[in-house]
Amino acid sequence: MSEFTEILQALEKFRDERDWKQFHNPKDLAIALSIESGELLEKFLWKGADEADLEGMKEELADVFAYAFLLAGRCGFDVRELVMEKIRKNAEKYPVDKARGTAKKYNEL
């Protein structure tokens, strides 16, 4: 069993024990993911990048991961496959010889 599968199964067990699957449609999971991402951003608001509360960041990042995993699971996506495919696509858009050391978007390289 992969780590991703183990995490998704634990999240789904927690959800199912509370009969929350009825609320976990893709739209609402995407909204929850966005809200939790905003809460993660709040940890940086009005602070320098190195001044954020690490414990608060961990808590909010865990929420972001949880909703992302639940959304992927609800849609039948394999998390590992999804991320590896995105890395492959980004490698094509951002070749090392053009992208190394720059924050430019792929269409500006």
Image (cartoon, helix red, strand yellow):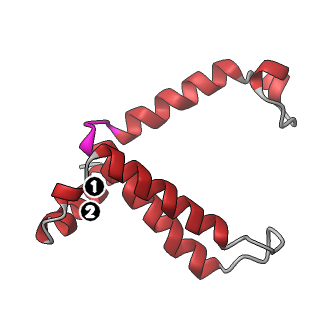
Q: Residue at x 84, y 31 (%)?
A: 104
How far apart are the alpha carbons under marks 2 and 1?
5 Å
In the rendered image of this protein, does residue 48 appear above or below residue 95? below
Residue 76 lies in the magenta-colored region: yes
> In the figure, is residue 83 to the left or right of 101?
left
Residue 73 visible here: yes
The picture places residue 96, in percent across and down from the top left corner, at 77, 25
**Mark 1 Cα-neighbour bin, 10 Å: few <14, some 14–19, many ≥20:** many
Residue 82: quadrant of the picture: top left
Image quadrant occupied by the C terminus: top right
Q: Amino acid at mark 1?
A: Leu
SS state under label 2: helix
Residue 65: quadrant of the picture: bottom left
In the rendered image of this protein, does residue 100 appear above or below residue 38? above
| Segment colored magenta | 74-78
Q: Residue at x 56, y 24 (%)?
A: 88
Tag 2–tag 1 contact (CB < 8 Å): yes
Residue 4 visible here: no
Residue bearing mark 2: 11
> In the figure, is residue 61 to the left or right of 66?
right
SS state under label 1: helix
Residue bearing mark 1: 8
Q: Residue at x 68, y 20 (%)?
A: 93
**Mark 2 Cα-neighbour bin, 10 Å: few <14, some 14–19, many ≥20:** some
Residue 24 lies in the magenta-colored region: no
Residue 37: quadrant of the picture: bottom right
The picture places residue 20, in percent across and down from the top left corner, at 19, 64
